Amino acid sequence: MSSQVEHTDVGAYALGLLEADDRRAFEAHLRGCGFCQAELREMGSLAEALSGIDPAEAEPPGEPARPPAPVIDLVRRRQARDRRMRRVAYGAGAAAAAALVAIGVGVGTTLGGDEGAKPQPQPQPQAIVGERHQATDARTGASGTVGLVNKKWGTQVTFELTNVKGPLKCHLEAVSTSGARSVVGGWRVPEPGYGVPGSPKPLAMQGATALSRTEISRFQVVVDSGGGGTLLTIPL
């Protein structure tokens, strides 16, 4: 496992496959991650299934019981698959963020030219494209809108978030009807925030998920920093 703790490590942790340093790092992450805590509780059903294994296949006395090799291989393959999907999703989010930064740099260059130069039109912010869904969280006050365009490879996502104070580190997840989660993109919220006094513009980003439009049941803005938790849920 890399030094970066990931949600997908919960399976390896539950089956005792993490090395000592990785286990301690994941336990520290687990204390502040409600998603991993819920998934770890669900792993109890796997433990019950493993309890019916023939005693002849058990470990020698005095040694900790380990799941069968096929189960270990299955967990490891799942970890590798989920991490590849996360890298693709984060790459799409990073590319979109880089495009937004490039737009900002272009505006600054145009406005900072010679005084005699003719003002240039400013580029418009990223528009919400496709099927729109909006929600406001009564607890946090955060408000967001997603735009969805179904593609052969999955779903293109445009997103706006407002009334959120920084500093925070967050990511947007697409949640399927079966409960599977796919990271659309991640970002930082600097002080004072987005769509708040002193910083009225919303956060605008573009990302993607491998889930098709019909597979998605909702989007969630998840806080990575501090105590974690869900900042906003947008049902579809």
Image (cartoon, grey):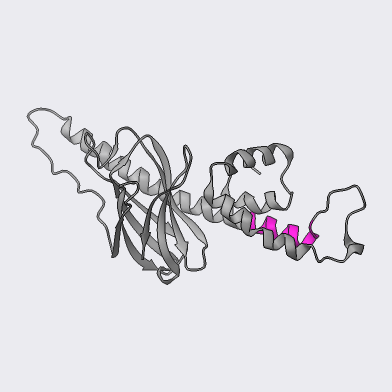
Q: The magenta stretch spans which residues?
A: 67-80
In the rendered view, tell whether residue 140 sits above or below residue 69.
above
Q: Tell me the residue at 51%/63% (across/down).
A: 179
Q: Residue at x 18, y 35 (%)?
A: 110
Q: Is residue 5 a member of the stretch shown in magenta?
A: no
Please give left or right for residue 176 compared with residue 56 in the image.
left
Q: Quadrant of the C terminus?
A: bottom left
Q: Nearer the viewer, residue 227 or 185?
A: 227
Residue placed farthest to the front in the image? 139
Query: How far across and how far down the image is residue 90, in percent?
Result: 47, 49
Disc count in the image?
0
Q: Judge whether residue 80 can be spotted in this image.
A: no
- The answer to whether residue 101 is left or right of residue 116 is right
Which image quadrant for residue 165? top left
User: Which residue sits furthest bottom?
Assistant: 214
Q: Residue at x 27, y 61 (%)?
A: 129
Q: In this view, does 53 lie to the left or right of 218?
A: right
Q: Let me know if residue 69 is in the magenta part.
A: yes
Pick the residue in front: 150 or 143: 143
Vertical comparison of 67 with 167: above or below: below
Q: Position of residue 117 (x, y in %)?
A: 9, 33
- Name the residue located 69 percent from the left edge and 52 percent from the top edge: 14
Q: Is residue 211 above or below residue 96?
A: below
Residue 56 seen anywhere in this rendered image of the structure: yes
